Image (cartoon, rainbow, N blue to C red):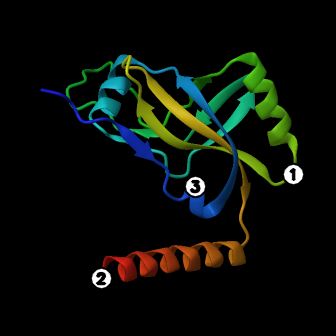
Amino acid sequence: MKQAPINIKNKRATFDYELIDTYTAGIVLTGTEIKSIRMGKASLVDTFCYFANGELWVRNMHIAEYFYGSYNNHSARRERKLLLTQKELDKLARGAKDPGFTMIPVRMFINEKGLAKVVIALAKGKKQYDKRESLKEKDDKRDMARMFKR
């Protein structure tokens, strides 16, 4: 029996932020955390990344406790370390120092080797009028698709 691919998205990220550059990072997890992710029990809502002592960390990532876990189960919203090359870390650090820029996780997936990966984006926050414009574009695309379907 083949398991469905895991692809957890942060849907608000593209609405609230303009994504400038993306990086794929590994993530340090415990045994019960990876089991919960494989079951699809994770969320990237209100998640952000920050630097501490030259290392990249992710905060507020919710990974539900594993149902079959014992007393060794993990806490759901603990901070987790992200793994990138030093060159990528330096590039992200330079970009995040600029005012108005932040680092947010956009997507979490499990690769073909069975490892959990997180796609991090260097992003700039949108203004209210930009959000209205993106909603208008979305509606226009949906209307065009309906017209061509008929």
N-terminal label among 1 and 3: 3
Q: Looking at this view, is 52 or 82 the one in front?
A: 82
Q: Is residue 95 above or below residue 99?
A: above
* Residue at the (41%, 43%) spot, across then down: 8
Q: Looking at this view, is 99 or 2 the one in front?
A: 2
Mark identifier at residue 99: 1
* Residue at the (21%, 31%) spot, across then down: 3
Task: Please state which amino acid type lies under the numbered disc 2.
Answer: Arg
Q: Is residue 91 above or below residue 43?
A: above
Left or right of 64? Residue 24 is: right
Q: Are marks 2 and 3 in contact (CB under 8 Å)?
A: no
- Using the numbered discs, state the Cα–Cα distance from disc 2 to disc 3 in whole angstroms: 32 Å
Q: Secondary structure at mark 3?
A: helix
Task: Please state which amino acid type lies under the numbered disc 1.
Answer: Pro
Left or right of 67? Residue 9 is: right
Q: Secondary structure at mark 1?
A: loop
Q: Is residue 138 above or below residue 105?
A: below
Q: Position of residue 40 (x, y in %)?
A: 31, 39
Q: Position of residue 50 (x, y in %)?
A: 70, 36
Task: Please state which amino acid type lies under the numbered disc 3.
Answer: Ala
Q: Position of residue 71 (x, y in %)?
A: 29, 20
Q: Is residue 54 visible?
A: no
Mark identifier at residue 31: none
Q: Looking at this view, is 115 or 102 the one in front?
A: 115
Where is mark 2, residue-wise? Answer: 150
- Using the numbered discs, state the Cα–Cα distance from disc 1 to disc 3 in whole angstroms: 18 Å
Mark identifier at residue 13: 3
